[in-house]
Amino acid sequence: MASTAQRAQAPTALRAIALTTLTLIAFAANSLLCRMALGGEHIDAASYTSLRLLSGAVTLWAIVTVMRNGAGAAPARGEGARWLSAAMLFVYAIALSFAYLGLDTGIGALILFGCVQVTMIIGGMLRGHRPSALEWLGLAVAFAGLIYLVSPGLTAPDTSSALLMALSGIAWGVYSLRGQGGGDPVVETSANFVRAAPMALLVSLTLLVALPIESFHVNVAGAALAVLSGAVASGLGYVLWYAALKYLTATRAAVVQLAVPVLAAVGGVLLLAEPVTARLVLASAVILGGVALAILGKRRP
């Protein structure tokens, strides 16, 4: 018969599993929604980014306002958020949108995820962390997988799109590093979205002046997909993630994210009929295996 302590732990474990699962689905949905919107030519990349960041800012601001019982106008003015962090959030979002003009969902998510993790591992080294032999090996394996994925060949992804996605991943990695050890993560994320949204709107207005009007198009489906990505997959997704982190160690949190590009690739195959190539499967195994090796081999302080 289960002890009282075991019975008490069961709801906590279920809550952790539920929060983590919903978060991973939300993160994978960001890639899928973006590809659905841009691949289907329902919206242009700049407008998608603007709507995504704007809807995310509104959602997170509303959540923070509720958390503060009505005293919630302050998130737009800071509390730990800095303009550099907001700029990194903007670069991540705008580069991801333009990258998905030429990448399938799974390949894009794999490049994004791989670059995020590699950036964070390197960032830890620059902050004084001394890597173990397994971390060095894992990092080298992950780099090799990324190089193989984008190397020339019949099934290689578009080079410019792959570079944009790598830039997106690096920006998100830097953003994540800057957010470590700060204040309330939901409040800071809200403030960063509020600051990043005008950056995206400025880019949209600049491109509207510089490019032919035919370059810009938004239909109902495209706007809805952008808002879903910003408000649900991003805004609510980050809130769920911060709630899930209460039940996860840093290592477990890093390892479970290995599922994100896999879920995104499965979604692309099932919903968008994207092909599964041998290059994608092999590169996925090498990149995710290398990242997992680096995470699990991390030397404890």
Image: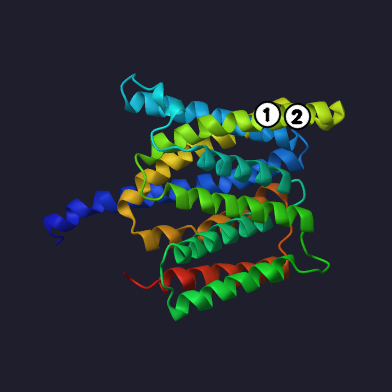
Residue 192 appearing in the image: yes
Residue nearest the observer in this picture, 111 or 167: 167
Q: Position of residue 34 (x, y in %)?
A: 66, 42
Asked if labels 1 and 2 touch by Cβ distance under 8 angstroms, the answer is: yes
**Amino acid type at mark 1:** Leu
**Label drawn at residue 202:** 1
Task: Name the quadrant containing residue 184.
Answer: top left
**What SS does tag 1 mark?**
helix
Q: How many marks?
A: 2
Left or right, 297 with respect to 226, comes to: left
Taking the spot 69% from the left edge, 42% from the top edge, the residue there is: 36
Taking the spot 39% from the left edge, 41% from the top edge, the residue there is: 185
Residue denoted by label 2: 206
Quadrant into which the N terminus falls: bottom left
Q: Position of residue 153 (x, y in %)?
A: 82, 69
Outermost residue, left direction? 4
Q: Position of residue 228 (x, y in %)?
A: 58, 33
Residues at marks 2 and 1, CA–CA distance in whole angstroms = 6 Å
Look at the picture and state if 70 lies above or below 84: above
Outermost residue, top direction? 70
Look at the picture and state if 272 lies above or below 70: below
Residue nearest the observer in this picture, 34 or 68: 68
Q: Residues within 10 Å of mark 2 (few under 14, many from 20)?
A: few
Taking the spot 35% from the left edge, 44% from the top edge, the residue there is: 243
Q: Residues within 10 Å of mark 1 (few under 14, many from 20)?
A: few
Residue 218 appearing in the image: no
